[in-house]
Image: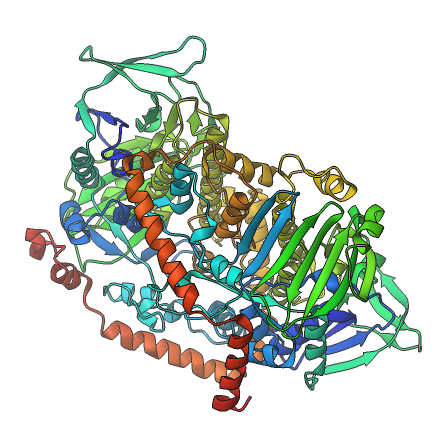
Amino acid sequence: MTAAGLAQKFANSNVEITLVESEQIGTVGVGEATLPHIRFFNNALGIHEPSFMKATNATFKMGIEFRDWGKLGDSYIHPFGDFGQPINSVPFYHYWNKLRLLGDTTKLDSYSYPIVASENARFQLPDEDISKIESTFGYAYQFDSSLYAKFLKTHAEQNGVRRIEGRVENVSSNAETGFVEKLHLESSEVLEADLFIDCSGFRGLLIEQTLETGYEDWSEWLPCNRAIAVPSTSAGKLLPYTRATAKKAGWQWRIPLQHRTGNGVVYWNDHISDDEACHELMSSIEGEALAEPNQLYFKTGKRRLLWNKNVVAIGLSAGFMEPLESTSIYLIQEGITALLELFPSLEFPDSDIDEYNARMDLHFERVRDFLLLHYVATERDDSEMWRYFRNMALPDSLQDKINAWTVRGHIIRYEFGAFLPPSWVAVMAGQNLLPQKYDVRVDKLAQADLKQQARDLEASISRAVENTPDHKDFIAQYGAAIPDMSEAG
Amino acid sequence: MSGPSLESILVCGRGLAFEITLAALAQNLPKSVKLTAIEIQSLPDHDVFYGNVTSPLAYEFLLRLGLDEPGVLKNTDTVFSYGTSYKNWADKLSWTQVHHLAFPVWNNVQFHQYLRRLNAPLEPYLVNAAAGKEGVFAHPPNDAKIPLSRAEYGYQFRPQSLYALLKQQPTPENVTRDSGEIEDIIIQNGEISSVILEDGRDLSADLFIDATGITGALVSSLDTCASVTRNLAMSEHLTPSTSPASVRKVEGKTYGWQSVTSLQNHNSILTVSAPEDIDRAKADISGDIHSEFTIAIGRQHQGWVGNCVSIGHANTVIEPLTPAPMMMLQLDIERLLSLIPVTADMSVEQQEFNRLLDNDREHCEMFNVAFFNIPQNPNTAYWASALSNAKSVKLTRKLTQFESRGHLTAFDFEPFNEQDWTILHFGLGRTPDRYDPFIDNVSEATIRGQLDQLQSGIEQIVKKMPPHGRYIENFLNYLERKHGR
């Protein structure tokens, strides 16, 4: 992604971009689900959506289903979209909150077009007419990340990126400044550059092994530290959403692609062994396993500096948080965007580096809070892991958000970050963290009128979903299907 | 009880903040909430310090107060405003600070980076700056192909006339409105339990709103403190006018600054100086002074304390050099409406209101402070005291980033947007040390061609626009004919 992003920006310029990678080093296949922001990235690269989807076996994604998070047996979808539309400038979820407190049992989900469409395995592109309920959502993709990498590699090479197949054997730095100067490859080739971008994964070849930047360990808040991934054959309807099912010592993902399903489990090894986790995963996947399970080890957190001297860490080398809300690729994208906006001069001014780090720190911290919310907004106490979260002291930023919501249904908003108010509402309400009171402005609308408007909204969503094509049919009709998709279930 | 338990609100104060608060609460709260409003006639009138200009957000805000644009234009002396033209700022700088939608982005690179490459000015490419220079106005059309669609506008107004219009509005049935003087404020457990008036009335409520202006009569009776950054002297006088300009005009002076704001039938002229230079400022005034006072620029440490929320000058006094004072007042109201308490324990609402207030104040103040962060300010009391305002960390980041590379650092929900900051940077002559390296791929001739095309489109549209005064007249006549208003 980084090479493609830079190449697009610097095509036909005097900035030379070299990509060093080795086919022998595998990639981590956990980032197969994305957030809607990726469409901005693809659009900026001029990528033709159906071609990209065909090349990466992609499906559409309108949200994430969370099972067993609030309590065992619960299920909700965090949609990429809003709940209803504001009435008198007040968001609709405040009105739902009043109805709920009056005894109405209609779930908030019923007022979300993307949720109801997801539940029915339907999909269409958002309507451009913003007055229509079919316009009230965004979408992302579920794709094969290694195929996406290949797709972008071609794109990057077409834009002038020089690709070198090889492994870095050694790195030399300037003795005085500490700046990285040369990469020595196994092939004896030596590469010099002004700026080095470290996309070497967890090990952080340049940012950590060379510059010893240091790592902020967030295990205190996000203690899961291992994952096992395995692909399986497709089974059932092709769903336009990812699933995350909470387990006793972690959670399990299910990501439906056109040709297969991605599965995996994230867990805290203090409370479950690798063998047990693997057994639990393999015994619960739908379809047949297509490969041996792939074991991964990680520590949640981020580098103390994501940009240090003349090295910028992007991707897993920058930091890692579990892919519960599909934020891995989002954070890569934010890193690339920030780098392009703050692309340095040869002097590498501290102001550029400081600005980049401040901006990325904010994104990481805001994602961390949102992920942590899933673990603490729960009634579960059926295992050591869940009891750990019940006794946790939360970051103030998250505790304040939870307080404002539970007291009065107020969302403390921010402008810069992945998750807007409807996302916070979806998770908190979905996990039974419910406000005790409702916003007084809602009483401006007469109760009978409110009930009628809510019924009308629910009915209009049902009608709209009935007229929405089946997800799999839409992919085929859109020209985005791989040739053998008809066999994909 | 599952529903909100707030039953009564008492609003005390006078002037624009008082009337706006009352209108906003009456319009947006249900009738079950009993509103009592006590107008305190003895309070000093500093409404002129809200300034004469609003941001474009005022359009929506008026609707939330139960007013609309035609009604305000017809019933007050308000006119449209594309922004403010600054002249001789710090003795040397002149530019037009207009309200504008996002600037063009060519090849994923921001517009101002191209200007930096050519060392070109920004102003010729701002359609409403060109219109403001000619004194013409028209509403921005929806058609994005027309250059005027990129313009935004606010209003030029006198706070006193908006106050009078709001006061004339019918009183809703859940509002009890009266006047009186505060004799005492009874505090129990760190909260106001009642306000005693001189005539003996004892007014209790669940929530108290302090719109008493700089005295902060209610909020200062609780556990909070105020800080003052500097004092300013201000006066207002009026002069006749027949052809309103579509921008406010501010001229820098050695004693401070003077603004001329065109209204429908006259100009409101504000003269601002350091108190030490008040004689020099007065020598610059030709006409009868309508009001004059010295005021402390500063803030209450907390805007919401216990069960008392302060609004407008009661929590923050900010210099009306920009639309910042009206923006702050509007933001106070929006914060209050979204946080009307639901239980007797208001700690959540208080914390969130104060957090947002701190952010809004910092963001508005740093825009104003940035006006003075230029080399060689005049060596007089006003300019020296303005410069003594410390640059916040956020402002330092903004200035460093722009001066270094033209990058526009932004923070959550800033009232002044990227365009406002870009125009200000260019106006104050801030030039980035370098531009986006991508632009080296684009020939100078290509950039000039695109800029010329843009400028030519602007010149053509501005030629066709009517004088501001005639536009308002036609607009009001049209509304009269079509809608009988």
Q: Can residue B319 be seen in this snapshot?
A: no
Number of numbered discs on residues? 0
Classify A224 as above or below B368: above
In terms of depth relative to the viewer, which is nearer, A272 or B429? B429
Classify A222 as above or below B179: above
Say whether residue A451 is left or right of residue B264: left
Task: Tell me how the rendering is colored.
Answer: rainbow
Say whether residue B145 is left or right of residue B480: left
Q: Which quadrant would the C terminus of chain B be assigned to in this image?
A: bottom right
The structure residue drawn at horizontal position 23% and vertical position 58%, both measured from the top left corner, is A239
Say whether residue A353 is left or right of residue B194: left
- Residue B464: x percent and y percent? 41, 69
- Residue B310: x percent and y percent? 74, 61
- Residue A145: x percent and y percent? 23, 41
Residue furthest out toward the top: A175
Q: Quadrant of residue A111?
A: bottom left
The structure residue drawn at horizontal position 53% and vertical position 58%, both measured from the top left corner, is A411
- Residue A422: x percent and y percent? 44, 60
The structure residue drawn at horizontal position 42% and vertical position 73%, both measured from the top left corner, is A106
In terms of depth relative to the viewer, which is nearer, B31 or A65? B31
In terms of depth relative to the viewer, which is nearer, B449 or B344? B449
The structure residue drawn at horizontal position 73% and vertical position 45%, both measured from the top left corner, is B254
Classify A172 as above or below B463: above
Q: Which quadrant would the N terminus of chain B be assigned to in this image?
A: bottom right
Q: Can residue B110 be seen in this snapshot?
A: yes
